[in-house]
Amino acid sequence: MVEMEKEVLPLPPRYRFRDLLLGDWQADDRVQVEFYVNENTFKERLKLFFIKNQRSSLRVRLFNFSLKLLSCLLYIIRVLLDDPREGTGGCWGCPKRNSSEQSWSQFDWSFIIWVNRPLPLWALQVLVAFISFSETMLLVYLSYKGNIWEQVLRIPFILEMISAVPFVITVILPSFRNLFIPVFLNCWLAKHALENMINDLHRAIQRTHSAMFNQVLILICTLVCLMFTCICGIQHLERAGNNLTLFDSLYFCVVTFSTVGFGDVTPQIWPSQLLVVIMICVALIVLPIQFEQLAFLWMERQKSGGNYSRYRAQTEKHVVLCVSCLKIDLLMDFLNEFYAHPRLQDYYVVILCPAEMDVQVRRVLHIPLWAQRVIYLQGSALKDQDLMRAKMDDAEACFILSNRFEVDRIAADHQTILRAWAVKDFAPNCPLYVQILKPESKFHVKFADHVVCEEEFKYAMLALNCVCPATSTLITLLIHTSRGQTAPSEAFKQRTGAFQTLTREGGASSADQWQRTYRRCSANEVHHIRLEESKFFGEYQGKSFTFASFHAHKKYGVCLIGVRRLDTANILLNPGPCHIMGGSDTCFYINISKEENSAFVRGHRETMRGPGRGAGSGMPQTIYHGLTRLPVHSIIASMGTVAMDLQDSSDSSPDSSGGGAGGSGGGEWGRV
């Protein structure tokens, strides 16, 4: 053994593992070896074509479905061409016997066993039956797994033998060509082929319809097959009785199954009466099961929210809100801020949440204000099927929000990151707005269009409070939608903490002046307008920013805080006296409403100039009464010449417009 091991030479350098992987070897001394397994046998290749391969199997199912429908159509043609009053002679070639020779009260089995079948029609039916029989036997052979009775005792196989084998026998025995064959039973085989075809279609296109669609289709097919079987059976059995046509049989079945029962058309002989009893029993067993499954799926669909309509997604604009747990305060904050913008009134909001709606959310979504615009879908943003239900690829934007009251904030950020990745992978062109809780999580969602970190924003506000007191209060009031003095206190009951106490006790009827002032000023928002189109600032063209800010606040009560030139995307906050106002400048100001929604009463100026200003002079008090006595405009004018450049993000926002409202207006400011 030792000598044999010494004689083994090492592999040459060209047989190194790297070379084997890269294919860097000489091909002259290599031999290609093909390994055959069971899949390459003739039976396995046939199984691959007829069963395993989705596309070829779909074609086979479609051909089988068409074949069954053709056989049913040929049966209807045979019934329309057959008239028992012309007489029947039983077997093929036997002399015909007129049916008028006997009374209809006498029961004659020959009218049930034998029919009149023209030779061309018989040839077509034999051809269809032979093809169907060959296909069935081939599928039985390919599906055989050691138990032949499992294949033979299947209901589709039994129906196939009943409707196909007699035609094959008539080729051998021509005297049986007029034998009645229940070809109408092929409708049940067509139903079975249709169900298999839909399953293959789902596998081939890698998409699935809802379970509701499949169940409705099965129910409709069951009803059609049940009615068709009853119509054809009664019509044939009544050949020996009342001689009903197909339309008469259809009328009788509809009246019977609808429990109306006029009684003008009734079966006359006991075989047809027995068939009616059997079909009613079958209907009472089969149909309730189908309706029960349909009702169960409908209830589950209603619980999960169903699907967002594809037609509505293509004709209307909608946004998707993805949350892990939907609370009433989060929902109301989002809806109030989102629909505060005038250009977003026609948008639909599709909520995608894995949890079931609680009682409070359900009650809110039943309010007419939200019922027609907010759609709740129970599902996960991590599943493509649920994203498809929400029509994420057609959405104008996707908002992924976190619950700010989460105990484990790191785990909440992990869920947010996974949802953001899933949405970006499914709909890469959909604008993505992500809210995270921890600053270290921003790196993982940098691909999003806009990322808001709660802790980062909170600490930035605290730092600004150290530089300028009450800065956080100012910014919070500007970006938060409020109705000010006109809003009832009940609208703010969802707020928590000191603000809730303030709004309950410090409303417009509060005795404290600072609370009334706070309440009124909370309605101020940030708006913007072009200077040459503005009545507030148009007269200050060519003046300095300080002059325009001072006199605009003194004259109109608006606070000019920044401008943006036409040739730049940066916003200059308080550029100081060095900046000269131009007609193409965009002015950013704080006011209750935008200028387009304001009314100008020139008489107020003369009244304010007179000695008797205020309530005693008859001028109605506005929200600025009492505020203009404070040196606010002096403070604005003396803020200095320090300018802060802010990136304007209003162009990339889906809710940008000429003037912001609440949170929408605050979105124009980018970062602070």
Image (spheres, rainbow, N blue to C red):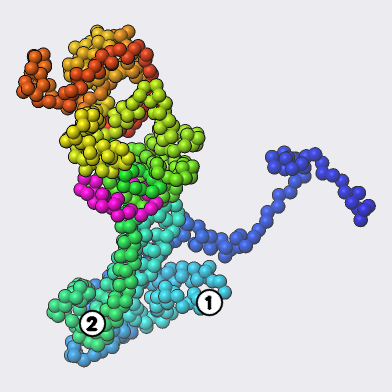
- Residue 560 in the image: state x and y as whole percent: 26, 18
Q: Is residue 46 magenta?
A: no
Q: What type is the residue that disc 2 sits on?
A: Glu
Task: Tell me where residue 71 appears, x and y as whole percent.
Answer: 34, 69
Q: Which mark is residue 148?
A: 1
Asked if residue 89 is positioned above or below residue 578 in the image, the reply reads below
Residue at numbered disc 2 = 238
Nearest to viewer (mark 2 / mark 1): 1
The x and y percentages for residue 222 are: 32, 69
> Which residue is painted at 48% across and 77% down in the image?
152
Quadrant, the C terminus: top left
Disc 2 is placed on an element classified as helix
Q: Looking at the image, how many numbered discs can be counted on the residues?
A: 2
Q: Nearer the viewer, residue 188 or 314?
A: 314
308 shown above or below 62? above
**Residue sitting nearer the eye, 465 or 452:** 465
The region drawn magenta spans: 346-371
**Residue 233 visible within the image:** no
Q: CA distance from mark 2 to mark 1?
A: 39 Å
| Label 2 crowd (10 A; few <14 / some 14-19 / many >=20) | many
Disc 1 secondary structure class? helix
| In this picture, residue 40 sits left or right of residue 477 | right
